[in-house]
């Protein structure tokens, strides 16, 4: 029972920190100092990634109407193809399918999201193991918390004098989608925050806070599904019944908490900027450095 209590706490932390720009990976590394799961290192590595799927399901639930690209339109009539060649018939049927069953704007949105994923696929995948070996420690987490906390404050102060040039999903250009993907690369270093890096990138590129946040949520769907799949492929899925139960509980808790965290963030940014998260990151980063420095001193 104690292990499942730890899982619940980790699920809560994941559900909150995945969407707020304060670094879920950084918080998970730090919380491991105080709450250690009594499991193998391999299972823990899979667990910390796979429970993110629960957080992703919250995005799918809350934004279903904005991201689901398929529909059935009754007002589209089928053409008479009797006098068409085979090639013409195939082309006409394809366009009929698109007109009746596909929401083109959402289909294009998903292609833009895939473009945003390209930098992580090209650069992030080859460096994944190296980054884990060299950067997954409290010093890097603390420094990144502070650095990006300062950046949030500086950029929000600068952004106060600007009006966003992009406020709708349909207005995001292919170039902007690719550049947001480049900003996402910064989150490969723990303590940065994937949502924080992409939100900051979106704001710098002229997106409104609401739009930058929404696009960040949508971008997380293929990124986290891909990351979870990679971990499962890397370590396999040879887990005990208890370990599978821990995964399910962690995902469910992350899902429920994520629903509230996303709703809170979307409501908060209607009237506020992101500076409060910047100050939180700075204070937490300083506390982390002081804690571990004190721990080393008295060891």
Image (spheres, grey):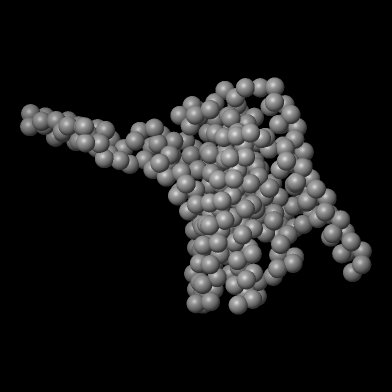
Tell me if 273 is positioned left or right of 79 in this view.
right
Q: Which quarter of the rendered picture does the N terminus lie within? A: bottom right
Q: In which quarter of the image is residue 95?
A: top left
Marks counted in the figure total 0
Q: Which quarter of the rendered picture does the C terminus lie within? A: bottom right
Residue 232 location in percent, x, y?
51, 63
Residue in the image at 80% along x and 48% along y: 283
Q: Residue furthest left?
A: 82
Residue 32 visible, this orientation: yes
Q: Quadrant of residue 129?
A: bottom right
Q: In which quarter of the image is residue 180?
A: top right
4 up-or-down from 159: above or below = below
Residue in the image at 62% along x and 53% along y: 16
Camera-nearest residue between 290 and 80:
290
Residue in the image at 61% along x and 59% along y: 12
145 up-or-down from 78: above or below = below
């Amino acid at each position: 029972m104690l292990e499942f209590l730890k899982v619940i706490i980790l699920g809560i932390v994941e559900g909150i920190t995945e969407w707020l720009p304060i670094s879920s990976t950084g918080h998970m590394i730090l919380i491991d100092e105080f709450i250690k799961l009594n499991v193998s290192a391999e299972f823990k590595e899979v667990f910390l990634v796979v429970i993110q799927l629960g957080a992703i399901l919250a995005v799918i639930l809350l934004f279903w109407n904005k991201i689901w690209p398929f529909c059935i339109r009754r007002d589209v009539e089928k053409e008479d193809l009797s006098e068409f060649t085979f090639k013409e018939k195939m082309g006409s049927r394809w366009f009929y399918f698109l007109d009746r069953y596909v929401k083109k704007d959402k289909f294009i949105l998903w292609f833009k999201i895939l473009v945003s994923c390209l930098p992580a696929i090209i650069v992030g995948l080859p460096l994944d193991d190296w980054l884990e070996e060299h950067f997954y420690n409290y010093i890097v987490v603390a420094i990144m918390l502070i650095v990006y906390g300062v950046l949030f404050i500086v950029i929000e102060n600068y952004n106060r004098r600007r009006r966003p040039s992009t406020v709708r999903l349909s207005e995001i250009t292919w170039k902007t989608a690719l550049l947001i993907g480049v900003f996402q690369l910064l989150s490969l270093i723990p303590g940065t925050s994937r949502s924080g890096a992409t939100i900051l990138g979106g704001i710098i590129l002229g997106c409104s806070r609401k739009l930058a946040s929404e696009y960040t949520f949508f971008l997380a769907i293929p990124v986290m599904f891909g990351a979870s799949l990679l971990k499962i492929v890397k370590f396999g899925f040879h887990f005990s019944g208890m370990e599978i139960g821990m995964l399910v509980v962690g995902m469910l808790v992350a899902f429920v908490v994520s629903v509230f965290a996303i709703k809170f963030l979307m409501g908060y940014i209607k009237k506020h900027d992101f500076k409060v998260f910047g100050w939180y990151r700075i204070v937490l980063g300083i506390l982390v450095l002081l804690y571990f420095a004190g721990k080393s001193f008295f060891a």
